[in-house]
Amino acid sequence: MPDLLIELFSEEIPARMQVRAADDLKRLITDGLVEAGLTYASAGAFSTPRRLVLTLEGLLGESPNVCEERKGPRVDAPEKALEGFLRSTGLSKDQLEARDDKKGQVWFATIEKAGRPAADIVAEVLEQTIRNFPWPKSMRWGSGSLRWVRPLHSIVCVLSDNGESEIVDLEVDGIRASDMTSGHRFMQPMRFSVANFEDYAAKLKKAHVILSAEERAERIWHDASQAAFAQGLEVVEDKGLLAEVAGLVEWPVVLMGEIGEDFLGLPAEVLQTSMKEHQKFFSVKDKSGRIVKFVTVANRETADDGATILAGNQKVLSARLADAKFFWENDLRVAKAGMEPWVDALSNVTFHAKLGTQAARIDRIAALARDIAPVVGADADQAEKAARAAKADLSSEMVYEFPELQGVMGEYYAREAGLGDDVAAVSREHYQPLGPSDDVPNAPLSVAVALADKLDTLTGFWAIDEKPTGSKDPFALRRAALGVIRLVLENGVRFSLVPTAREHAQTRFSGVQFGSDSAQLSKKDMAESIRGVVPFLHDRLKVYLRDRDVPHDVIDASLAMPNADDLTLLVNRARALAAFLKTDDGTNLLQGFKRAHNILKQAEANDGVEYSFGPDPKLAESDEEKALFAALDAAEAEIAPSMQAEDFGAAMRAMAGLRAPIDAFFEGVQVNADSQILRRNRLNLLHRISSICLSVADLTKIEG
């Protein structure tokens, strides 16, 4: 069984496209081959800046013979129907067979397709793949019609088996497949032949090309870490930058350079961001956390051990950092004089065409933060003050140059403005959490402003009917919702979202024009438009809790209870219920509840009445029935105060005490007794079982 090697060699492929392109090559080729009848044992895809590579092991030498039987029209069908059937099968009439069918005799065709050599199938599939490759962006060059991300230079396509290799006969826009490839662009550009993947990978390594992106990344990190460690320093970890740089070089050479003394006083975040965004440099810090050097990765070895490369990089870096220093110093002058000019300037910056300016949004956030502050234990005046300063840095020169530093620079500037450390920290922390793994602020001021920021975003975009659809979420509303959930739950915040969101929308969007006709929404319309915010939060909460092993039906059972817009209360109930249902008592009680509930509902449907009147213990005949009355009295006496105190664990334990009496009742008592008086009383008793259990959670939502 032969192995297949494919290499598509081109000019430099953008680093951000390489991994996806390698996966697409593997998917398109393997899908095409399997569809044509060629199976394989294993597949591997690789990418470098100049090549996409695919290797398949254990490929079938040829596709299997196929015999297909196809039913055609009736023998007495019109001639045109028969002609169409013959065209579709490629057969003549004398090759058909007439067989008896339910509706008379019918033509049947037996189509035999002989297997084809792997080389022929590979050639077809690879050409189709190259011509229809799903690049995010592509180009044409010269006079050809082929589109590729960058000009395609050569194609390697080789089948190898037992030491023998065969070049697949393929030509795409004048590029003929061969067994020849090239090494490193500068260090070994001469072409050489390859026989199979092992030979190819070994010769590439000798030609200063590391085929695996993971191996390149490992080498970069190892060499950079060792170089820093030797000087008592540490490289700042950045996995995204590491993956990008590994996609920029075929033969990584790590070099460590100096940062000019004039720039060492810049904030670490400024140095790190400037070097990463402009130069793709790694930052190197000392034991105090100060950025003192940088690491760059060259794509070649040089006779001077990279001295010339470093000199050029340091010169360019100095120019970039000079700009950053200029922005920093100008911003400091504004901050020290108070940040009012920046805040005033935001009145000329549109947040959204239908939601007004950034200044108007800041007013809304400040008012909402003031409302939320007492709930989270923050001072209302300080919360409003922090909210008004939190976005001032959006007007600064540094954030204009590096938008990703919003909030980070705001913290520096707020300190320079004399606002105090607590208020300054809000500038950075109110954006958090930025993702599922990001830290959640716990300082009361930061929590108040962060919640206000995210709730204003959600209510505002809901009011103008800009909701996420499918995979599209241009305003990051899902992230804002997850932020609200994590802020509330991880800080144990207790407040009701519905009245908070409604009050905020009705009172603080009153001057905002909504809709293409610029009509203002009434308070009633506003309340209706934001009604979906809490269900949207609940949907995100389900995802959040499912990732933490809380089943979806348990979440639904808790959502159906009162005060479900109090997320902390809701989650406490769901976690207690999930833990209870994992016990034997919980599982068995659930079955007993469902049995009682189903019998009751069926009887009510058949009789056309509701059995919700208190059962009379005097009518209890058996010991099991009497014991159930007593158990329900005892459970209700414990459950009601436990639920009032929000002690869901205690309520669940009280419910667990009902398991045995309910089981015994169903084993020893006939609910549908001959006596209508006893039957009604026992159905009312089932209603009491159901209502007591439903007072804790809606167990009808639980599956199983």
Image (spheres, grey):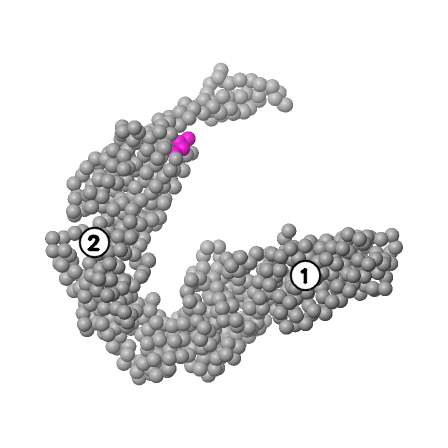
Q: Is residue 38 rendered magenta in the image? A: yes
The relative height of residue 546 versus residue 107 in the rendered view (above or below) is below
Q: Quadrant of residue 391?
A: bottom left
Estimate the x, y position of residue 615 in percent, counting from the top left. 81, 63
Task: Indicate the secondary structure of the residue bearing disc 1.
Answer: helix
Residue range of the region highlighted in magenta in the rendering: 36-40
Q: Quadrant of residue 474?
A: bottom left
Q: Label 2 belongs to which residue?
A: 253
Q: Residue at x 52, y 72 (%)?
A: 493
Q: Residue at x 45, y 57 (%)?
A: 472
Estimate the x, y position of residue 200 in percent, counting from the top left. 25, 38
Question: Image check: 592 left or right of 495?
Answer: right
Mark 2 and mark 1 in contact? Answer it, CB < 8 Å: no
Tag 1: amino acid? Ala
Question: Image check: 95 left or right of 396?
Answer: right
Q: Label 1 belongs to which residue?
A: 656
Characterize the local packing of mark 2: few (<14), some (14-19) or many (20 or more) Cα atoms within 10 angstroms.
Answer: many
Question: Image check: 386 left or right of 528?
Answer: left
Task: Indicate the secondary structure of the residue bearing disc 2.
Answer: strand
The CA span between labels 2 and 1 is 66 Å
Circle 2 or circle 1, nearest the eye: 1
Q: Quadrant of residue 291?
A: bottom left
Q: Residue at x 74, y 61 (%)?
A: 689
Answer whether residue 410 is visible to the viewer in this image.
Answer: yes
User: How many numbered discs?
Assistant: 2
Dot placed on the residue nearer the N-terminal end, 2 or 1: 2
Answer whether residue 353 is visible to the viewer in this image.
Answer: no
Tag 2: amino acid? Val
The relative height of residue 337 versus residue 197 in the rendered view (above or below) is below
Magenta part, dominant SS? loop
